[in-house]
Amino acid sequence: MNATTLSRFAPSPTGRLHCGHVCSALNARQLALETGGQFLLRIEDIDFTRCRTEYTEGIFEDLAWLGFQWPVPVRCQSQHLAEYRQTAETLLQRGLLYPCFCTRQEIQREIAAAGGAPHGSEGPLYPGTCRRLSKDEQQFRVNRGDSFALRLDLAAAMATVCRPMEWLDLNRGPQQAAPELLGDVVLVRRDIGCSYHLCVVHDDALQAVTHISRGEDLFEATHLHRLLQELLQLPIPVYQHHSLLRDADGKRLAKRDRAETVQALRQQGLTPADVMHRAGF
Ligand code: GLU
């Protein structure tokens, strides 16, 4: 690591922060501080169906209370949708995305009829139904006004890159990207016009992030992100996937567990040091 380390914490404002987030934020800050680098905060608020301004404000409030500092203005993804559309467009032009008209139920029916499908961290992998549509049929359905998502044509994408695609996980060591873990993922959602995967890769490169610390629930996603970096010719950050914090019953902490939010712990009289301790520091 060197002095140009740039790490980031990139929460989605879909609820108040809990100790799992604090763990990610502290890890990211530590990666930067260890090397005299910088820690960034980014708000990943593309999903207008779930994100709320009050939660964004809650993130600022909780992090400030914990003693974090970050450069302003903070990048909020909802302000940059045109950039993400442009990135998707370049992949589309290269024939690496295809429109998918399937509803969730149709996908489930198709998987059931096929007797199952391989599973990734986001559920069963898409069985490729719409990848097999002819160009004419795609066009017909688009013209008819059928709503669609854009999925990555994984086989087409893999055919354009040199392998192995390597990346480093600070906890698990050198890795070789295996994007087949996620299959033909949706890169442009039909409801919000972009996706976490597309935006996070775009922004980490744009902001010159060198070190990414996040929960191990995103480990499989990193295999896909590495492929997207290759397709878009972006630099490859170093990753660290930390284990997830669990409650007393062994369930991973979620934003819906109100009692475990930083706000609730603070109201119960815990100090910032207590909360950081709970987050494993
Ligand atoms: N916005 C994502 C989340 O809150 C985190 C993304 C990341 O760290 O790459 O789950």
Image (spheres, rainbow, N blue to C red):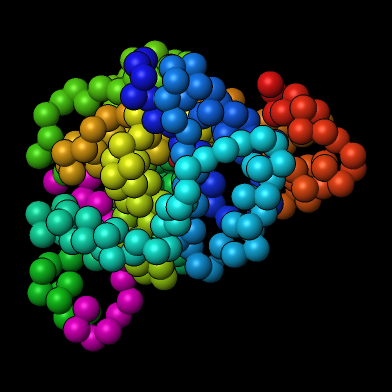
Q: Nearer the viewer, residue 172 or 117?
A: 172
Residue 255 to residue 190: above or below = above
Residue 28 to residue 72: above or below = above
Residue 40, position as x, y percentages in the image: 46, 39
Q: Nearer the viewer, residue 234 or 141?
A: 234
Taking the spot 63% from the left edge, 57% from the top edge, the residue there is 57
Answer left or right for 160 relative to 265.
Answer: left
The quadrant of the picture occupied by the C terminus is top right
Taking the spot 44% from the left edge, 30% from the top edge, the residue there is 38
Taking the spot 59% from the left edge, 57% from the top edge, the residue there is 56
Given the current orientation, which residue lies at the most extreme bottom position? 144
Q: Nearer the viewer, residue 37 or 260?
A: 37
Q: Nearer the viewer, residue 180 or 5?
A: 5
The quadrant of the picture occupied by the N terminus is top left
Can I make out residue 270 in this image? yes
Residue 93, position as x, y percentages in the image: 10, 59
Given the current orientation, which residue lies at the most extreme right position? 268
Answer left or right for 280 relative to 133.
Answer: right
Residue 222 to residue 138: above or below = above
Residue 29, position as x, y percentages in the image: 53, 28
Residue 148: say if magenta. yes
Can I make out residue 219 in this image? no
The part of the chain drawn in magenta is: 142-156
Picture quarter containing residue 250? top right
Picture quarter containing residue 230? top left
Residue 216, position as x, y percentages in the image: 52, 30
Answer left or right for 205 relative to 77.
Answer: left
